Image: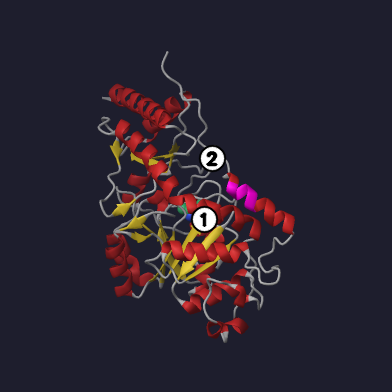
Amino acid sequence: MSDVFKGSFTQQEPIPEAAIAAAVEVMRSGRLHRYNTAEGEMAQTALLEQEFAAMVGSKYCLAVASGGYAMATALRAVGVKPGDKVLTNTFTLAPVPGAIAAVGAVPVFVGVTENLVIDLDDLRAKADQADVLLLSHMRGHLADMEALMAICDAAGVTVIEDCAHTMGAAWKGVPSGTQGKVGCYSCQTYKHVNSGEGGLFVTDDAEVAARAIILSGSYMLYARHAAGPPPEAFAKIRYETPNISGRMDNLRAAILRPQLQDLQTQCERWNARYYEIEKGLRDTPGLRVIERPEEETIVGSSIQFLLLDWGETKVAEVLARCAARGVELKWFGGAEPVGFTSRYDSWRYVDAPRMPASDRVLGGIIDMRVPLTFSLEDCALIARIIRAEVSAVYQAAA
Ligand SMILES: *Cc1c(COP(=O)(O)O)cnc(C)c1O
């Protein structure tokens, strides 16, 4: 009888005890709203913003209700208007084109390479179509950020980074989210820190930060932002910026602060698991691992590999055989959106032309979560199962 994996691909670790204690303290105080502070008290949310800004080396930080909210706020704050086009990745998750649609703008998809990053040639070719790129570091894969910024700077394109999968990652040592005008992070349960829902927004631009703070629902209490710009930055924009409530509360911030302290360690634990799986998959006939560039500091909270040009039937067979042995794989090539996975032609509110080169890559991307509740032995077992099932289907076809 062949091995079966019994773990859960959606089970995260518990919230650390220090975070639970901090949450209980906030609840005892009754002051959950970020602007409800006692005399001389600094809100948990303001402290979180200060600590996250220091961690990534940004001037300003704003904590909000979700990663998707952070992205929509970033688009508004840099001046995207209804009807504007916004460049974005063809390989990403639904909240990314959703953030563009939320501000009434129109996504223009840029292709994906076999290394699962945005296709810089396609970006160069489309750079004159929009003033903004919402760049999704999908599943943690960072494009050559220097080359990307050079293309965007030359074309006058403002870059907003979706760092939902790159909190803790870096390109040549520069923290992900600090190369573009704005970096947006998610604190949702399946990302790198867990407050159920939540988002973080960083920028070095005082006016963009001021707009984002007012947009998030600060009323005229913006002076209480420890990681916000000086009052002058609000002088004019406070009259012309709508309040679109999406604040973070002190309870979530309290849960997140101890997790930020642990982030580095957690990233190392993810990477140990990632490389264990990668090691087990390497040199499987017909399967391609994604080679990670030396310049990239990765966070292996998920892993992808390619079954390039296998065709729908054989990919489906691999998925079914792995599922029968407890290994839950996701496929970006499916014609129908399933669970969290969909692709650009599933978002039918966008009139997107077909992208054959990207279709070929998307058709081969297999994706798997790597929760920290997996042991290294679990990871080795998972890799053995995938290797065996991919090999069986590959050999049967040969
Ligand atoms: C989760 C996710 C988001 C959005 O984050 P939420 O906090 O769920 O709104 C954005 N982009 C990607 C790639 C994601 O995976």
User: Dot 1: within a 10 Å radius of its alpha carbon, few (fewer than 14), some, or many (20 or more) residues?
Assistant: many
Q: Residue at x 29, y 60 (%)?
A: 120
Q: Residue at x 53, y 40 (%)?
A: 12
Whether residue 347 is visible to the viewer of this picture, yes or no, is: no
Beta carbon at label 1 within 8 Å of ligand 1? yes
Which residue position holds label 1? 186
State the residue at coordinates (50%, 42%).
336
State the colouring used for the structure image: secondary structure
Which type of secondary structure does the marked residue at label 2 adopt? loop
Q: Look at the image and say whether residue 69 sits in the magenta stretch.
A: no
Q: In the picture, residue 339 is in which quadrant?
A: top right
Q: Quadrant of residue 25?
A: bottom right
Q: Is residue 93 above or below residue 40?
A: above
Name the foreground residue: 320 vs 303.
Answer: 303
Residues rendered magenta in the picture: 18-22
Q: Amino acid at mark 1?
A: Ser
Q: Of the residues under marks 2 and 1, which one precedes in the sequence?
A: 2
Q: Position of residue 35 (x, y in %)?
A: 67, 69
Q: Residue 57, image x and y in percent?
A: 41, 66
Is label 2 or label 1 in front?
Answer: 2
Mark 1: which secondary structure?
A: strand
